[in-house]
Image (cartoon, rainbow, N blue to C red):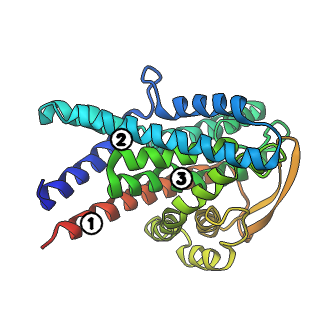
Amino acid sequence: MELNSFTESFSLLLVGAFLLDLAIGDPRWLPHPVVLMGKFIAWGERLLWSGRATRDLLAGALLSLSLIVISFGVAWGAVSLFSFLLFPFSFLPTALLASTTLATRGLLNALTRIESQLRAGDLIGARRALSYIVGRDTGSLGEDKVLRASLESLAENTSDGVVAPLFYLALGGIPAAMVYKAVNTLDSMIGYRTDRYLYFGRFAARLDDVLNFVPARLTAGLMVLAAYLLRLDATRAMRVVRRDHGNHLSPNAGYPEAALAGALGISLGGPSSYFGREVWKPHIGEERTRVDTDMLKEARWLCLVTTLLSLMTFLLLLRLVSSP
């Protein structure tokens, strides 16, 4: 295949996948790869976890590499199978498979559900809705903590759930994006610094750090630009990114969280509970505006514009690659 036609097909795939995800999200009738990955990880954990440091370090690496190989192989096989069809018939299933690596609609819908519950005065319902998108314990959170946790999750998942998968789709197609989703799912399930997962999830957590290095920083830059386009405080967003990006347990998540905190004029971080254990997170940003429910709508627009800018960026890069 010529370079021009190759990059054009990748560009079309990115646009198709993005629009499909935005239009239909993750239909319940469609088996989702991340759900299957999660079941494989849970099965592997039950089979391999021992509670012994060295063995768990090796077992966790084996589980991670197994899922990566399976995810790549299944994705490559599916794409190869679709390629035997004529283009009009091959494009839709290929784009649909690619869209399962993205989470734009799901992320926006999750924030909308939390906002709706809070506006209805249903704090318990808001906590329950929040629990689907965060790893922390949500059962005792007050409204302020629910709002801040929602905003933190939105910022981090704008990178992990949209920008990073688009980056790997542009870089290596569906197989590369599926490998990223496998690693990210592993990190979300076993990549915690708890007694149980400190060794078992270490390989997955470090690999996730590597794969998110570029996307997280790119997300922060694009979020600053999105803040400017939305007439939020882009100058403060840039300043907070430069100053506070390191105020996070993750080497990557601090970047998009700092951009969002600066754009909205709020502070994120502080104490959170994971698996019954309190973890202190350094503060990111400064409290210039009271956090309220209306801020969730602003944050959703910030997320959406950031993801659109990332799509445009990758399309432009693909165009530049194909230029003589």
Q: CA distance from mark 1 to mark 3?
A: 21 Å
Q: Which amino acid type is shown beneath numbered disc 2?
A: Ala
241 with respect to 90 (left or right): right
- Report whether 272 appears left or right of 130: right
| Mark number displayed over residue 98 | 2
Relative depth, front residue between 2 and 154: 2
According to the picture, the residue beneath numbered tag 1 turns out to be 316
User: Image point 74% across, 44% down: which residue?
Assistant: 56
Q: Residues within 10 Å of mark 2 (few under 14, many from 20)?
A: many
Give the vertical position of 17 relative to 156 (above or below): above
From the image, which quarter does the C terminus lie in?
bottom left
The residue under the point 13% across, 55% down is: 5
Task: Report whether residue 287 is seen.
Answer: no
The residue carrying mark 3 is: 160
Distance Cα–Cα, label 1 vs label 2: 19 Å
Q: Secondary structure at mark 2?
A: helix
